[in-house]
Image (tube, rainbow, N blue to C red):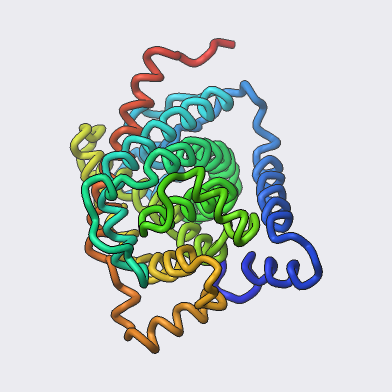
Amino acid sequence: MLHSQTGPSRLAEAGTARGIPPLLLLLLLIFVLLCLSIYLSMDVPAFQKISLGALEYKRCNSLMEPPCRFFASVSAAENKPFYFLHAVYEGIIAGGAAGVIAEAVLYPIDTIKTRLQAVHGGGKINLKGLYSGLAGNLAGVLPASAIFVGIYEPTKQKLLKSLPENLSALAQLTAGAIGGAASSLVRVPTEVVKQRMQTGQFASAPDAIRLIVSKEGFKGLYAGYGSFLLRDLPFDAIQFCIYEQMLMGYKLAAKRDPKDAEIAIVGAFAGAITGAMTTPLDVVKTRLMVQGSANQYKGIFDCARTIAKEEGTRALLKGIGPRVLWIGVGGAIFFGVLEKTKQILARRCPEPKM
């Protein structure tokens, strides 16, 4: 989405030059995306029964038939209809739980990865330092997951209905990008504070927020916003698409629903592949977010160019090992917990009856 210089980062620069606060531009961007998502799902009545699992699929009658438009949902029975609001509620709860658990378990690996990628890593890392910024980051994971799932699901379903069946992957990619862009309003400040603390710049999240705002203004909380979108929009879109397609392929090949361990393995592969593909973008995003008021880099492309020139192109792959491990294991935990939580919610909070 941001492969050219016409993305949000350039809009923010243009807005600043005209006296428009960057934060206002970000809010306008999110508002537009929310309106787009609402528009795409307007023809779906709130309590109409629709096929709306987080990762739902429609089984082909034969393995020789073309791919179906709805992909695997291992937590729900085949072709089981969902109520719109109930499905969104279920997705938000399950997504929030999965995000918090995965983040808490793998946070130390993320800290090591961040220090490897940053220019100044903050010295030696003790056990306590591995969890620096965890509480504040978890506080941001919950609303970010809620926004992402709440927008991803109806947008994906509308696109699946509108596009030809052989373009179902495009529907998932597009919905993932839109959901990721909307949730970035919460995710970017959370990520900025987290990474500043991981590199030893601040002792607590409240101190980090206060000092960032006092020195850099509110726009400091959105440092690296363009690079964040450049990394996370394709990441969210690709990871969910890979997961759904791999799970659908597994179910068609095995002719049964996968077990919990098999779901985790599929999630791990999806996460690891996506993590490796987006490592250079992650390095650029990290450098921009932790540079503070020094302004060592002028933007996304200047940052990538400077890193390659001064440190070599291999520097763009710094932290790829911890990142692939972190996201691979994180994918196993996230998708495993997501599907398990949905199963529990389906039993304890059944869908309302007409």
Residue at the spot 70% in from the left edge and 61% down from the top edge: 22
Query: Relative to 5, is 48 above or below?
Result: above
Residue 1 rendering spot, x and y as whole percentages: 56, 65
Q: Which residue is nearer to you in this view: 28 or 298?
A: 298
Q: Quadrant of the C terminus?
A: top right
> In this view of the protein, which residue sits in the foreground, 84 or 61?
84
- Give the left or right position of residue 134, taking residue 320 as reference: right
Q: Residue at x 69, y 35 (%)?
A: 43
Quarter of the image for residue 286 reads bottom left
Q: Report whether 178 appears left or right of 315.
A: right
Residue 92 appears in the picture as rendered: yes
The residue depicted at 24 percent of the width and 56 percent of the height is: 125
Residue 273 in percent (x, y) is at 29, 60
Pick out the residue farthest to the bottom: 309
- Toward the right, the furthest residue is 18
Q: How many marks?
A: 0
* x and y percentages locating residue 297 in the rendered image: 51, 77
For residue 330, say whether it is visible. Answer: no
Asked if 346 appears above or below 288 in the picture, the reply is above
Q: Give left or right: position of 154 versus 306.
A: right
Left of 151 or right of it: where is 264?
left
Q: Name the image quarter holding residue 44.
A: top right
Give the x, y percent position of residue 251: 27, 40
